[in-house]
Each structure stands twice: as structure tokens, then as C-alpha cells.
Amino acid sequence: MTATVPTSTRGVRRPQRRTRGRGPAAVIPLLFLAPALILLAVFVFYPLASAFFMSLTNWNGISSNFDLVGVANYLRLFVDPDFMRAAGATLLYTALTLPPSLVLAFFAALAVARHSRSSTVLRVSMAVPFVVSIAVVSAVWMWILEPNFGLVNYLAPLVGLPQQNWLGDPNWAMFAVAIPSVWRQFGYFMLILLAGIHSIDPALHEAARLDGASSAQRAWHVTLPLLGPQLYFCLVLGVIDSFQVFAQVHIMTSGGPQNATSVVVYELYQQSFEFFNTGYASAIAIVLLLVIGTVTFIQQRWLGSRVFYQ
């Protein structure tokens, strides 16, 4: 017996289209979202729109009079040697802080992963700098790096190294600023990686141990690949944080000596609050936002697909 296929839809009752999103029920989700949307509009979207508008003007931040200058502030960025030097200083700071922080955090997480009383003390001692104010951390390291009675210059001759004016020498100032940043940042990364290590199935390490893998081989071939999501998160967060560095630079060197540590955000601060070029500073802020967004997008597209999730 052959089944017949209807050739006409006449007489066939079609399902009624659901009227989703209509009626009083559709208003309830909006009421729950309203506080968050209002906060976003007031503290994110409005300041962003205002900054973009100011970047198209020559406003000095004080006067009520200003002129629209179009994209002149953006074009000025590409020929401004101070901004280009600040961009290079920001990249140098990122290179000096992010890789050491990730490497130290990985080995520290491996060291304290064991459940013992001593490892608990180590975890707390390494995580404390992150919860301390960046102003306090910067002040402590200014004393440690002080050229006359600082601890670093006191210990340097003992190991055969020359004494330096760490914060006053243009060749060493950025290294001196990067040290407390690494000291403060790697403890936070360590906590994230430590949580990732504890989430790894112990059977994987036991199987590798039965196959004769050493501790270093298990760390390299088992632990490190399975920490991909945590390392990816730390990398994205570290890049964003490094591109926005300001407090330690402002406290320790004020952008000096000879602008050696004047990063992009510090250049923005000077243009806005010292030179009263608020329109130009707004252009720097918008460009920095676009750069951070682009770098984050590239990281997400390039590294996000390579991260292995259990």
C-alpha cells in the first residue's frame, strides 16, 4: 500500500503563531533589568558618549566655550612624539610585567598545591600584596629601591652588583616600576591557577605517574595544558591591566625621569589635568579604549579556540 502525499494545504489546520513578547508579561523582565540598564547608561554609556564628543573639540576642561575641531585631535596623535613615547613605554611595561607574572604564578601554584600547613602560609603570604592598596605597595618599594639606604642597594654589593639610582636613572626606572607590579600581580594569578590545578582530575596525574613520568614531565604535559582556560583568563586580564597602568607610575616616578616611565594613561592625565587639553586627552582615551578592545578581540579569536576545556 502506497501512502498518498497531500498536494494542497487547503483544509489543513496550521499551528497558530505564538505572540511572544506581547502583553504585561513582557514588561516584567524589563523591570528586573531596569536598575542595571540605568546604571550602565549613567556610568558607562553617557561618559563614553561624552568623552567621544569632547575628543572632537578643543575644550580645555574649564571654560564653557569650545570649538568643534573634528578629527584633528586623532590626527595629532600620530605625529605627537610624547604620545608615541608613551605608547612604547606602555608596551615595555607590559612586556616587563605580564610574562614574569604568569611564569611566577604557575610555579608558585605548583609549589603550594600540596595540602599542608606550610603551603597555606605561602598562599597567604603571596596573595597579600594583591589585597594591599597599590599606593602602599608603591610606597614600600620606593623605600626598598631608595639609592642611599634602600635594601636593594644594600644587598647589591654583597652579590657583586653595582648600586643604582633605580628610580632616578632613565635606563632603570621602568624596571623599578615593573618589580612591584609583578610582586603584586603574580599572587592574584597564582590563586586563579591554583583553583585550576585543584580542578584537574587526579586520575590523570596518577596515570602519568604509572607511565613513569617525572614531576616536571607531569607539570609540563598534564598540568600546563589543562590550565589553558585559567592562563587564557590571566593573559587577557593582564594585558588590560597593563595597558591601563597609572597609580604606581604616578606615585613612584611621576612619569620620569626624562619621561622614561610616562605611559599612555599618565600622558592622558597630564594632558587633561596639567596642560588642560581635555579634548586631546579624550581622544587619547578613545584610542586606548579601541586598542584594548581590538587586542582583547584578537586574543579571544586566536587563543579562545585553542584553549582546551575539560
Image (cartoon, rainbow, N blue to C red):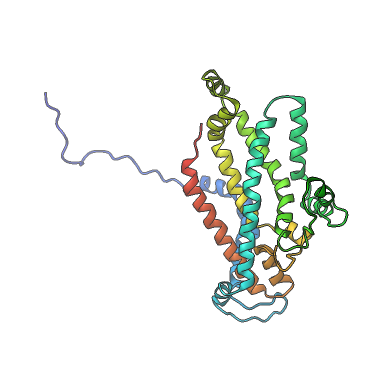
Residue in the image at 82% along x and 46% along y: 158
Q: Is residue 212 left or right of residue 160?
A: left
Residue 193 vs residue 49, the one in the foreground:
193
Q: Is residue 120 visible?
A: yes
Residue 282 vs residue 250, the one in the foreground:
250
Q: Is residue 258 left or right of residue 234?
A: right
Q: Is residue 50 visible?
A: no
Query: Which percent across, then down, holds residue 34?
Result: 61, 52
* 183 w.r.t. 168: above or below: above
Residue furthest to the left in view is: 1
Query: Which percent across, then down, holds residue 244?
Result: 65, 57
Q: Identify the image quadrant of residue 224.
A: top right
Q: Identify the image quadrant of residue 39.
A: bottom right
Residue in the image at 61% along x and 77% along y: 57
Query: Which percent across, then down, holds residue 186?
Result: 68, 43
Residue 17 vs residue 249, the one in the foreground:
249
Residue in the image at 75% along x and 66% along y: 257
Residue furthest to the top in view is: 210
